[in-house]
Amino acid sequence: MSKPSIKHTRVALAANVRLFREKIGWTQEQAADAIGIATRHYQKIEAGDVNVTLETLCHLAEAFEVSLRDLFEERGA
């Protein structure tokens, strides 16, 4: 089994963050406020344009009430 690239992992994370945010009906601004980051930085996370710190990942998982593993799990289209 091949190791996923960082870009591939970042794309999966971005898609999941957006999915979880939309599931609970939050705007990007509300999600950013809930985890204590700037809205623009949050937008970059959903776009897959930034490296996300472990601290931010933990805040995302807590806010969305999911595991860290859930944030990275590949989901079928």
Image (tube, grey):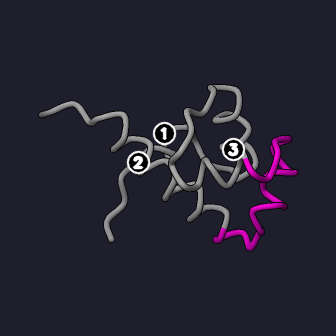
Q: Which residue is mark 2?
A: 73
Q: Quadrant of residue 67?
A: top right
Q: Is residue 52 left or right of residue 1?
A: right
Q: Secondary structure at mark 2?
A: loop
Dot 2 or dot 3, earlier in sequence: 3
Callout 3, which amino acid? Leu
Q: Is residue 70 left or right of residue 41?
A: left
Bounds of the magenta segment: 22-40
The quarter of the image holding the N terminus is top left
Place of residue 38 in the rendered image (x, y in percent of width and height, measured from the top left): 82, 46
Distance from label 2 to label 3 (Cα)? 14 Å
Badge 1: residue crowd in 10 Å (few <14, some 14–19, many ≥20): few
Q: Is residue 58 magenta?
A: no
**Whether residue 13 is situated above or below residue 52 in the rendered picture:** below
Marks 2 and 3 in Cβ contact (< 8 Å): no
Q: Which residue is mark 3?
A: 60
Of 52 and 26, the residue lying toward us = 52
The secondary structure making up most of the magenta span is: helix
Distance from label 1 to label 2 (Cα)? 6 Å
Residue placed farthest to the left in the image?
1
